[in-house]
Image: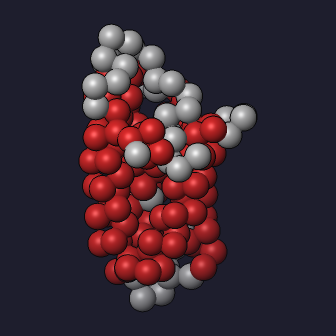
Amino acid sequence: MKHSVAVFFGVGRCPFAPGTAGSLAAALLALGLHELGGASLLLMSAAAATAFGFWSLDGQFEDEESDPPWVVVDEVAGQLIALLPVSLWFDLSETAETEHMIFGWLTGFLLFRILDIWKPWFIGRADKLAGATGIMLDDILAGATAGTILALIGVSGMMLGWIP
């Protein structure tokens, strides 16, 4: 069961770009979760993905600093975290339009992938930690950073009148 969670039920076995495949699966899952229960369900799911990620990786890779490419539960948790501001904004907005949601979702997906691959500053430092902590924490931080940037873009867009 732990292995199935770590590979996000087979997504991590994608023969090319498994991390991107995991992020894409998570973005699609997040869209469905938002439709079913809004930001609160997405937040609970992000917390569950994080907890299940640590659980599935517990005791594995403790002596290694690497993040195996087939482990994508970390991308799932990070991507769900990154998309929380979009979901919350749509829950709170009475004037939100579909094109804004598409833009927000795509921007959140891209920001997370860029930060997860590039691993600037504290994200890269977290990635160097051994075991489940390093595997999960860099993606959690990348997701939180992408979500913060996304929220700032949204607030700036509203202040500038680009987003109603």
Q: Residue furthest top?
A: 63
Q: Residue furthest bottom?
A: 94
- Residue shown at 28% from the left, 31% from the top: 58
- Confirm whether residue 78 shows in the render: no
Where 164 sits versus 135, above or below?
below
Side (left or right) of 41 relative to 67: left
Side (left or right) of 52 relative to 73: left
- Residue shown at 48% from the left, 64% from the top: 30
- Confirm whether residue 32 shows in the render: yes
- Estimate the x, y position of residue 54 in percent, counting from the top left: 29, 38
Where 78 sits versus 64, above or below?
below
- Residue shown at 57% from the left, 72% from the top: 100
- Estimate the x, y position of residue 40 in percent, counting from the top left: 30, 72
Q: Residue furthest front?
A: 1
- Estimate the x, y position of residue 103 in percent, counting from the top left: 60, 64
The structure's colour scheme is secondary structure
**Which residue is nearer to you in this view: 7 or 111?**
7
- Estimate the x, y position of residue 132 in percent, counting from the top left: 32, 28
Where 113 sits versus 93, above or below?
above
Q: Quadrant of residue 25?
A: bottom right
How many circles with numbers are drawn on the protein?
0
**Which residue is nearer to you in this view: 76 or 144?**
76
Q: Quadrant of residue 136?
A: top left
- Residue shown at 38% from the left, 29% from the top: 135
